[in-house]
Image (cartoon, rainbow, N blue to C red):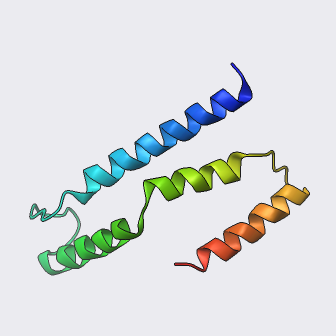
């Protein structure tokens, strides 16, 4: 299989997993007890998780993964530096 095809399949699989997890967790209005949390803190935790999921985008994750995996990035290489700087600038968005 060509490297490009393998990368595409890996990106597609990653995206599918992200979407499945987001749908599974989102659940909306879940009132079941949350293991390890008192009722009050469970509500706070669910609100925190919902706020996080509102910021998650499967399309963005797929695009970011494609960028990160586009080229080899051996430690100490110029690509490694580019990705380190990119990661630093992206984490500032949150």
Q: Is residue 11 above or below residue 47?
A: above
- Please tell me which residue is depicted at 12% across the width and 65% down the height of the picture: 29
**74 displayed left or right of 64:** right
- Residue most extreme to the left: 31
**47 displayed left or right of 5:** left
In the rendering, at what x and y percent does residue 35 appear? 20, 62
In the rendering, at what x and y percent does residue 70 appear? 73, 46
- Residue most extreme to the top: 1
- Please tell me which residue is depicted at 50% across the width and 42% down the height of the picture: 14
In the rendering, at what x and y percent does residue 40 appear? 15, 81
Q: Does any portion of residue 21 appear in the rendered image? A: yes
Question: Could you say which quadrant of the image residue 64 lies in?
Answer: bottom right
- Please tell me which residue is depicted at 21% across the width and 71% down the height of the picture: 37
Q: Is residue 47 above or below residue 67?
A: below
Total tally of numbered discs in the picture: 0
- Between 57 and 33, the one lying in front of the other is 57
**29 displayed left or right of 19:** left
**Quarter that holds the N terminus:** top right
Q: Does any portion of residue 76 appear in the rendered image? A: no
- Between 5 and 74, the one lying in front of the other is 5
**12 displayed left or right of 7:** left
Question: Could you say which quadrant of the image residue 90 lies in?
Answer: bottom right
In the rendering, at what x and y percent does residue 18 appear? 42, 49
- Please tell me which residue is depicted at 28% across the width and 69% down the height of the picture: 50
């Amino acid at each position: 299989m060509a490297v490009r095809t393998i990368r595409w399949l890996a990106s597609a699989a990653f995206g599918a997993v992200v979407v499945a997890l987001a749908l599974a967790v989102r659940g909306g209005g879940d009132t079941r007890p949350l293991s390890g949390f008192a009722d009050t803190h469970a509500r706070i935790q669910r609100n925190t998780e919902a706020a996080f999921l509102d910021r998650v985008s499967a399309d963005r994750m797929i695009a970011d993964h494609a960028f990160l995996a586009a080229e080899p990035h051996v430690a100490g290489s110029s690509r490694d530096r580019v990705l380190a700087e990119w990661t630093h600038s992206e984490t500032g968005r949150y």
